[in-house]
Image: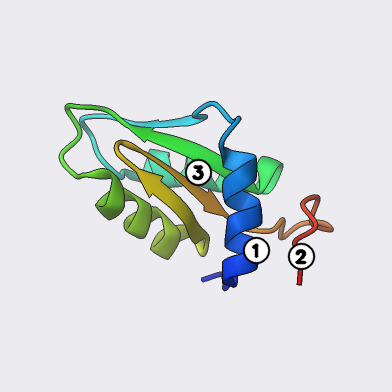
Amino acid sequence: MTDINSRQRAFLRSMCNTMEPSLFIGKDGVSENTVRECENLLEARELIKCSVQKEAPMDAREVCGELCLRTGAAPVQCIGRKFCIYRPKQQSDPVIELPR
């Protein structure tokens, strides 16, 4: 799992405020397809916002924890049914420059 400190988390939270959700968790919960899609989004964007639909079997904190565990990402923020996670690119140099 990626480790980030509180200053880095605050920086990433500020970036999340203007983002629209790019991954939606529905009635199937965290399936293999969801994890694969999350991996692809993290590799492309590094920081993603996810939304948990009403019919999902898990709440947002549970889904966030599960996706972070299975993708090696770090949780950034979880409010209501939405959450953000971060993982630097693994195939190339990171795009988002985190403060120290």
Classed neighbour count for the residue bearing mark 2: other residues with Cα under 10 Å, few (<14), some (14–19), many (≥20): few
Q: Which residue is mark 3?
A: 38
- Identify the residue at image location x=21%, y=44%: 59
- Residue type, numbered disc 1: Gln
- Identify the residue at image location x=71%, y=60%: 90
Between 42 and 11, which is closer to the camera in this rendering?
11
- Identify the residue at image location x=57%, y=49%: 13
- Residue type, numbered disc 3: Cys
Q: Which of the two discs, 2 and 3, sits closer to the camera? A: 2
Q: Earlier in the sequence, mark 1 or mark 2?
A: 1
- Identify the residue at image location x=45%, y=51%: 77
Where is residue 45, by image quadrant?
top right
The answer to whether residue 22 of the structure is visible from this angle is: yes
In the displayed structure, would residue 40 be above or below residue 68?
above
Q: Which residue is mark 1?
A: 8
Q: Which residue is mark 2?
A: 99
Q: State the separation of the CA atoms marked 2 and 3.
A: 24 Å
The answer to whether residue 41 of the structure is visible from this angle is: no
